[in-house]
Amino acid sequence: MVLDEVWRGLDGVEALSGPHGGPLRRTVKLVLDPLVIRPVRHPACAGPLIGADGATLLASLVHAHADALRATAAWFTLLKQVRRGLRVTEGNPQDLYFQRCFELAVTAGHPDPARDRPRAEAALRDIHSFAAGRTTQALKDHLTDAERAERLSALIAVAWGRRPGAVAGREFAFAPLLEACVSGDGGELFRRLVASNAGTHTGISLWYREKDCGAFDLGLTEHPLPQPPRLGASASTADLGLPFDRTVYERVFTVLQASTERAELPAIPDLVTDEIARSCAPWALLDETLRVVASAGVALALGLSPIVGAEGMSDAARREHRSGGPRARGHESGSDPRHAVAGGRVTAEASSHREFSGERRREVGVASLASAGTGADSAVRAREGAPHTRAVAVDTGASAPHTGVVGSRDSGPDGVGPERSSGETAAHRVVNARWRREAYVLQARRLVVSGAEVEGPLGAIAEELRTPWRPYLRRLWVRLHGRDVRGAPADEPGELWDLLDGVARSVMLDHRTRVRKALSVRAAEPGAAESRAS
């Protein structure tokens, strides 16, 4: 809100602003944060909440760059005009041009539309020359050729038909890795899991496990079981499918859109054939280190509980809270994941006690995917001497699929609310503590506890916080997929935690941005109270 109010005080930046006068999300992401505010250099301006000194510093930084920001907006307008004249349609202009326009603003000042048009045209040609034929139009042409499309569809059918079956008796525990990786340790544990193909086995099980802890429950597909990929011929960043449901076109399209050096990517035909092989592989990834990261990510994600505690709620609200409330998109039906309890080398058989707390999901391991035997209904081996355990209630209002051994803990009174963790890993403590401090989480928790049905952005975010593993795992997969295409495995010991923690931060930032946008729209509505810096 502080940044929004400061921005509204500037004139001449309409090209960088939204319809209600605040800065565009890409303006913040590509210009203000990295080039103007620079929160690493100015920690007082970092974080979702800043103090009076931070607000003053932030305002002074923005005002100090006011001329450069006005010039940036003017350069962006000029580049768009030149873009239309050259009939360039490739890429998102904001993604491609914002930072170059800021560079031009700093080095050349405010542009003159006539004098600086050649400079703008040269910048535009330079920006788009990196594609080297690797464009979305070239991708579409490649996939819509009838004869070629038939051959590629046959290739998908062959690759999908050659998938291996699930292997019984394989058990993998990821809790020790999640405990060690926060401090940069765990390199030997990670290498051991890679050598044992833990990521491959857990990924294979996602193909065959329909109930309780499959890809559907994790939010990776809208189907009971993953389906073979379709070729596709179009994509929209605003309406992409879930990770395992994306077409080959969507998968390659996102790679092209995200790449700043397309010339370094394989040619379009190679990108497509590689993607077909990748989409028919475990986890839809080819590199084993990235598959292990994905499996560890499940173990972390199922232990996330940004909304904790339900003290003081009414009986009716508590029943709704425990029943899981409204399901997330793509999960309107299906089995209750609480009905399967197994994991790693710890197994609690389904018995009359079939209700488990959100934290109980830490008892259920990614290993259960690999140790579940062949088929979706295979039994999970019980660890010798392991006691049956029971926990009740749900921290977040929806139960997590039981697919990650990450420890366990006892619930609070009536099974609701946090007590001191007896098995929570260091990774969970770090991420959960940071997430629970977010102001929007506190508001969302009140919505969940009250049982009120809330529409709009806050309601949508509250729903995501009830099932936090879904947005987390979707974002993690996207990041791992990008690395897989670029041939960037997670070889270094510190990369595992950088990836897992970075995705958590990204999800929080996305939620924060959506809340800020909603508040900005509300503030701009007629009759809304005047916003004030805080």
Image: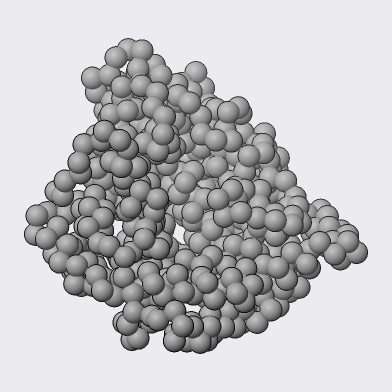
Q: Is residue 403 left or right of residue 136?
A: left
When asked about the image quadrant of residue 101, the answer is bottom left
Vertical comparison of 125 with 411: above or below: below
Residue 526, by quadrant, is top left
Front-most of residues 22 and 515: 22
Q: Residue furthest left?
A: 53
Task: Answer left or right for 169 relative to 464.
Answer: right
**Is 264 left, or right, of 531 in this rendering?**
right
Q: Is residue 515 visible?
A: no
Viewer-nearest residue: 425 or 118: 118
Q: Nearer the viewer, residue 147 or 73?
A: 73
Residue 89 can be seen in this image: yes
Residue 375 % position (x, y): 71, 40
Which scheme is used to colour this image of the protein? one colour
**Residue at position x 17%, y 62% from top?**
59
Q: Note whether 93 is above or below 20 in the view shown.
A: below
In the image, farthest residue toward the top: 315
The residue at 31%/65% (across/down) is: 12
Looking at the image, the residue that sits furthest to the front is 114
- Report how many numbered discs are placed on residues in the image: 0
Please give the name of the residue rendered at 47% of the width and 46% of the height, measured from the top-left corner: 471
The residue lying toward the viewer, choosing from 18 and 364, is: 18
Image quarter for residue 237? bottom right
